[in-house]
Amino acid sequence: MTQSEKLAQSLEQLQKLQKNGIVAIRSRNLTRTHLNRLMKNGFLKDVIKGWYIACRPDEFQGDSTSWYVSFWHFCASYLNTRFSNAWCLSPEQSLLIHAENWTVPKQLLVRSKKGNNTITQLLFHTSLLDVRYTMPKKTEVEEKNGLKLFAKIPALIACSPSFFILYPTDARTLLASIQDASEILPTLLEGGHTTIAGRLMGAFNNIGQNRIAEDIKKTMSAAGYDIREQDPFESEFKVQLLKKMVPPSVNRIRILWQEMRIPIIERFPISPDISINVKEYLHKVEEQYVADAYHSLSIEGYHVSAELINKVRIGKWNPDNDETDYNHKNALAARGYWQAFQAVKRSIQKVLMGENPGKVAWNDHGDWFRELFGPSVTTGILKSAELAGYRRHPVYIRRSMHVPPNFSTVSELMHEFFDLLEHEAEASVRIVLGHFFFVFIHPYMDGNGRIGRFLMNLMCASGNYPWTIIPVEHRQQYMNALEKASVEEDIIPFCDFLRNFLWVEKCTL
């Protein structure tokens, strides 16, 4: 039997495990021969002694993608095995997940009666800290994606006061999901939690849920408890939250938008006070095409050249008779980019003629997506169903700790996102947050980065800024800035990064 045939046998065993939903692979799941062969050929990655995850053999040394994709499933399996299902995440981590914040933490804090207060080092500077601590009642534990969590209300009562300071966006998101004081009062009354009741009163008043705060006060007082209100947040809150029943992630981006817009307005260059000639503006956009296509496609990992881009643009490239050294995938991506670019130009013209940029983006972004991938569907590389619209599966961003929202919430998130764009008065905010939140939500299985940059440039036009190219040479800085905003909610590095490529003084339209 050849080496390739032996590897095929080992891969077949690995595939069986994956089909059964096994992410955290134990050494006893595979024979020593299969295990060693898969490790040697780069299909398995060693996490801790006796535990592995599947990975791609083409991942370079230090690539964290497979680990971040596997993190939550791995931890759930490992903890179930180690603590015989008698464990749960800390109240604080449970609350983050209830708020749909699936960012991979540096250290995952776990409670268990069998805990021994030790740290287990995992991959890429992540770790588990298991503590021997009082477990919640069985009725106060929920399971989500295999993880055992404090239920939302018990977690809000058990969490430390610092949670509201360290994670104000998530805390407010969760409080906004509570519709009535009756959801939280039974637990407060049963435990006689006067201090916590005062804290939650202050928290609800902070986000404008005054009726809930007042009901907590009246009910606790009627039961004989003396409570004193204390606002656990460090800042005032002026965002109008959606009171209808929506996924927590919808209010979360609404909160983040309002918090992030302030530093953007303070730091971004003032919109150029110039008279725009629509024809000249579109001509200058067209002049940027080759450079824009090269850099945008290169950022996404495609291998293109100015020659190929031009050849595809003027229709001299034949997919059945490719004379270049570039494969069909790269050429089809270039063709799709050209078609999408033309659609974006039509959208820009609408904006320059006075239409609301948020409405234009809402109406037209689906056209950009279809043009971007139309050539690949026509040639059969992609199935026609790929053009159907927003994703219907989980998606992960390469080497990112940010986990995009669940696909079941994408439609509602995109409605909220475009509503925020439509009603945003500041062009600078539309430029920065238009790009950021599009890739944060990641509504499509592919093409999000390219469409995010198209969206950024549509918003540039709405503020008389020039078409802006992000050079591939600055890709790492670009990705780092997006990661900072996604994981730490710090928009300033991304704002500053985009500002550096807006040569406003050169815009003489």
Image: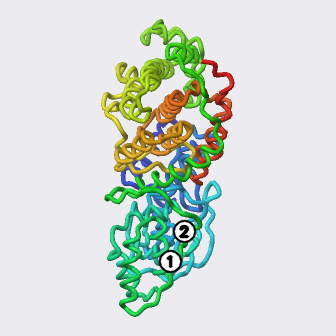
**Helix, strand or loop for disc 1:** helix
Q: In this view, does 214 lie above or below 336?
A: below
Residue 495 in the image: state x and y as whole percent: 62, 41
Residue type of the residue flagged with mark 2: Phe
Position of 464 with respect to 471 (left or right) is left
Residue 290 in the image: state x and y as whole percent: 57, 16
Residue 239 in the image: state x and y as whole percent: 47, 56
Labels 1 and 2 touching (C-beta < 8 A): yes
Task: Write the residue at 53% across / 46% down.
Answer: 55
Which quarter of the figure has residue 117? bottom right
Residue type of the residue flagged with mark 1: Arg
Which quarter of the figure has residue 384? top left
Work out which quarter of the rendered image holds the C terminus and state it.
Answer: top right
Q: Point out the frontmost of discs 1 and 2.
A: 1
Of 12 and 492, the residue lying toward us = 492
Of 63 and 196, the residue lying toward us = 196
Instruction: Specify whether residue 35 is in view.
Output: no
Of 487 and 65, the residue lying toward us = 487
**Helix, strand or loop for disc 2:** helix
Position of 466 with respect to 246 (left or right) is right
Q: Is residue 65 above or below residue 237?
A: above
Q: In this view, does 314 lie above or below 437?
A: above
Of 143 and 459, the residue lying toward us = 459
Instruction: Specify whether residue 42 is in view.
Output: yes
- Decide which of tag 1 and tag 2 comes sooner along the chain: 2
Circle 1 is placed at which residue position? 199
Circle 2 is placed at which residue position? 164
Residue 22 in the image: state x and y as whole percent: 42, 56
Task: Write the residue at 36% across / 80% down.
Answer: 185
Q: How far, Cα to Cα, is label 1 from label 2?
A: 10 Å
Mark 2: few/some/many CA within 10 Å (<14, 14-19, 20+): many
